[in-house]
C-alpha cells in the first residue's frame, strides 16, 4: 500500500527538482522597486538586448560567401527578434518554445501542478528555464550543422564550436533579461518588449536609413524617406521622382513609400482592433439586487499576439528542419514534400515550406497566394482557440477566478470568449496577410505584435504609475 501511494504521488514535475539548485536565478527584490528604478532597469535591459543584436558572431569570416544570399527566415525574424549573423540569431525562439511546451503539458494535465502552490510555481519556472537552455543549445548546434553559416568543413571545428557557444550565450542573455523584468525590476515582459523594439527599429531603419546600395543605376539610399528626398532634390522631373519613390521596391526589394503607407495603415488598423472589446457586468456575490458592480472586458484580440508568435515559431522550426533534410536527402519524396529549396538552400521553391511563405507577388502566383492566405487564417484561428484552453484563460478558468474573488457574472462567458478568440485570430491573420501582400515595410505579423505589445506596456506603465 505504501509503495502504491508513493508511486501515485510521483509527478513528472518532480524530475526538475534536482536541477533547481544548479540553475542560475534572478533574485526577487526585497521590496517594491521605485518607479524610476523600474524605468531605468527596463531601458538598460532593452539597451543590452539591442547591443547584443548588433554584435556579429566571431568565426564567420571564412564562411561569409557561403552564408550569404537570400534569407529564408526573413518573414519570421521580426517576430522572433532574430538578427542574422549576430549573437541574437536565435532570438526569443527558445524561450517561446519552452514556455509553449510547458503550457501545453500543464493545460493537457500531462504535468500536474497547482498554480496556487508557491513550490509548484517555482518548479514550473525552473522547468521552463531548463527547457529553454536545452532548446537553445539544440538549436545552436542545429544551425551550425545544417550549414546556415557554411559547411563545418569550411568553418573548421574550432570556429563551429565557438559559434555554438556564442549562440548559447545570446540565448542565456534573453532568458535572464526576461526574468529580470518579470521578477519586478522592470515593466512587463522582456520577450514582448524586445519584440516591439526590434520591429520598430526595423521599420525606422528601412524608412530613414542613410546607407546606399548600387543596383546598376548608381548609388541609391536604402531608406524610403531619405531616397524620396534625394530623388526630389536631384531629378528634373518631380513627377518621375515621386513615381519612383513609390514603386522602386519591385526591382531589388528596397523599401518605398508605397510600403511605408501600407505600414502606417496596418499600425492604425491594429490600434483600432486592439481597442474593440465587450464589457460584461460583474457584481459581488452578496450584493443587493440592483447593485451596480464592475465589468469584465473581453477583447476582440483576446489572445493578444500569442497566435502570431506561436505560428512564427512553428514556421521557423519547419524551415530549419526542411533545410537540413534537403541538403542531405534532397530528391526524396517525403523531404521534397516538406520543402524544396534553391541550390544554396536559401529560398523555398516547393513543398509545404514554399506555400507557408508569403509570395513575392500575389498576381504572379495566385495559387501560392490563395494557399498562403488559407493557411494563415486557419492556423491563427486554431492556435488562438487552443491557446485559450492551455493558457488558463478559458471560460471555465475565468469563471473560477471570479468565484474565488466572490464575484458573479449574470452573462455567459462561453458565449463570448471562444468567439472572441477565433474571430480575433482570423482578424490577426487577415491583417498580417494584407500587410505582407501589400508590401508593407517589415513583417505584418511583427508590426501587429509590436502594436499589441506597446499597448500592453502602456497599460502596465499607467497601472504602475498610479500605484506610486
Image (cartoon, grey):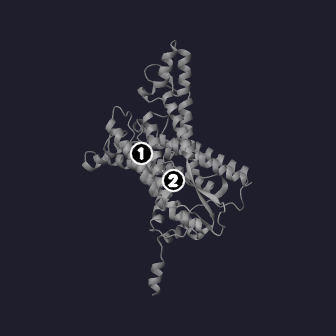
Mark 2 — residue?
Answer: 303
Position in image of residue 432 (x %, y %): 46, 41
Crowdedness near tag 1: few (<14), some (14–19) or many (≥20) residues, C-alpha within 10 Å: some
**Residue drawn at point x = 56 percent, y = 39 percent:** 200
**Residue drawn at point x = 45 percent, y = 27 percent:** 249
Residue 85, above or below 107? above
Residue 273 marker:
none
Position in image of residue 179 (x %, y %): 59, 56
For the image, the number of numbered tags is: 2
Q: CA distance from mark 1 to mark 2?
A: 45 Å
Position in image of residue 43 (x %, y %): 65, 46
Quarter of the figure with residue 339: top left
Residue 104, above or below 249? below
Q: Is residue 129 left or right of residue 434?
A: right
**Residue drawn at point x = 48 percent, y = 73 percent:** 11
> Looking at this rendering, what residue extends furthest in the bottom direction?
1
- Dot 2 falls on a residue whose secondary structure is loop
Mark 1 or mark 2: name the one nearer the start of the chain: 1
- Dot 1 falls on a residue whose secondary structure is loop
> Looking at this rendering, what residue extends furthest in the top direction?
236
Name the mark nearer the viewer: 1 or 2: 2
Crowdedness near tag 2: few (<14), some (14–19) or many (≥20) residues, C-alpha within 10 Å: many
Q: Is 139 or 359 nearer to us in this picture? A: 359
Q: Is 291 or 35 nearer to us in this picture? A: 291
**Residue drawn at point x = 40 percent, y = 39 percent:** 358
Mark 1 — residue?
Answer: 156
Residue 392, above or below 36? below
In this rendering, does residue 156 appear at all? yes
Position in image of residue 52 (x %, y %): 57, 44
Amino acid at each position: 500500500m505504501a509503495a502504491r501511494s508513493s508511486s501515485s504521488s510521483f509527478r513528472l514535475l518532480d524530475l526538475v527538482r534536482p536541477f533547481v539548485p544548479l540553475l542560475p536565478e534572478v533574485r526577487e527584490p526585497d521590496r517594491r522597486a521605485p518607479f524610476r528604478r523600474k524605468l531605468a532597469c527596463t531601458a538598460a535591459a532593452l539597451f543590452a538586448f539591442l547591443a547584443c543584436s548588433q554584435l556579429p558572431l566571431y568565426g564567420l569570416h571564412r564562411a561569409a560567401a557561403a552564408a550569404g544570399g537570400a534569407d529564408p527566415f526573413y518573414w519570421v525574424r521580426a517576430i522572433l527578434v532574430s538578427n542574422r549573423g549576430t549573437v541574437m540569431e536565435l532570438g526569443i525562439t527558445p524561450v517561446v518554445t519552452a514556455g509553449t511546451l510547458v503550457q501545453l503539458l500543464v493545460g493537457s494535465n500531462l504535468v500536474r501542478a497547482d498554480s496556487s502552490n508557491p513550490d509548484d510555481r517555482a518548479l514550473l519556472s525552473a522547468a521552463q528555464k531548463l527547457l529553454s537552455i536545452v532548446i537553445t543549445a539544440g538549436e545552436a548546434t542545429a544551425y551550425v550543422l545544417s550549414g546556415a553559416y557554411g559547411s563545418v568543413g569550411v568553418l573548421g571545428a574550432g570556429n563551429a564550436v565557438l559559434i555554438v557557444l556564442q549562440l548559447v550565450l545570446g540565448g542565456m542573455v534573453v532568458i535572464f533579461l526576461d526574468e529580470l523584468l518579470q521578477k519586478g525590476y522592470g515593466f512587463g515582459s522582456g520577450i514582448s518588449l524586445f519584440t516591439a523594439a526590434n520591429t520598430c527599429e526595423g521599420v525606422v531603419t528601412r524608412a530613414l536609413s542613410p546607407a546606399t546600395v548600387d543596383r546598376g543605376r548608381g548609388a541609391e539610399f536604402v531608406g524610403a524617406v531619405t531616397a524620396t528626398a534625394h530623388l526630389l532634390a536631384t531629378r528634373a522631373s518631380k513627377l518621375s521622382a515621386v513615381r519612383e519613390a513609390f514603386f522602386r521596391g519591385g526591382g531589388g526589394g528596397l523599401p518605398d513609400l508605397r510600403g511605408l503607407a501600407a505600414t502606417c495603415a496596418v499600425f492604425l488598423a491594429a490600434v483600432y482592433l486592439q481597442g474593440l472589446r465587450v464589457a460584461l457586468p460583474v457584481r459581488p456575490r452578496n450584493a443587493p439586487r440592483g447593485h451596480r458592480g464592475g465589468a469584465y472586458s473581453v477583447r476582440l484580440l483576446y489572445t493578444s499576439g500569442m497566435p502570431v508568435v506561436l505560428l512564427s515559431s512553428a514556421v521557423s522550426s519547419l524551415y530549419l528542419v526542411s533545410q537540413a533534410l534537403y541538403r542531405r536527402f534532397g530528391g526524396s519524396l517525403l523531404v521534397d514534400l516538406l520543402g524544396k529549396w534553391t541550390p544554396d538552400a536559401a529560398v523555398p521553391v516547393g513543398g509545404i515550406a514554399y506555400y507557408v511563405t508569403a509570395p513575392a507577388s500575389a498576381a504572379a502566383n495566385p495559387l501560392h497566394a490563395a494557399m498562403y492566405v488559407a493557411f494563415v487564417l486557419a492556423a491563427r484561428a486554431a492556435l488562438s482557440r487552443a491557446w485559450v484552453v492551455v493558457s488558463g484563460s478559458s471560460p471555465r478558468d475565468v469563471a473560477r477566478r471570479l468565484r474565488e474573488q466572490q464575484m458573479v457574472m449574470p452573462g455567459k462567458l462561453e458565449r463570448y470568449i471562444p468567439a472572441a478568440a477565433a474571430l480575433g485570430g482570423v482578424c490577426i491573420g487577415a491583417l498580417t496577410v494584407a500587410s505582407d501582400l501589400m508590401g508593407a515595410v517589415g513583417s505584418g505579423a511583427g508590426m501587429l505584435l509590436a502594436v499589441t505589445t506597446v499597448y500592453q506596456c502602456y497599460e502596465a506603465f499607467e497601472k504602475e504609475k498610479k500605484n506610486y
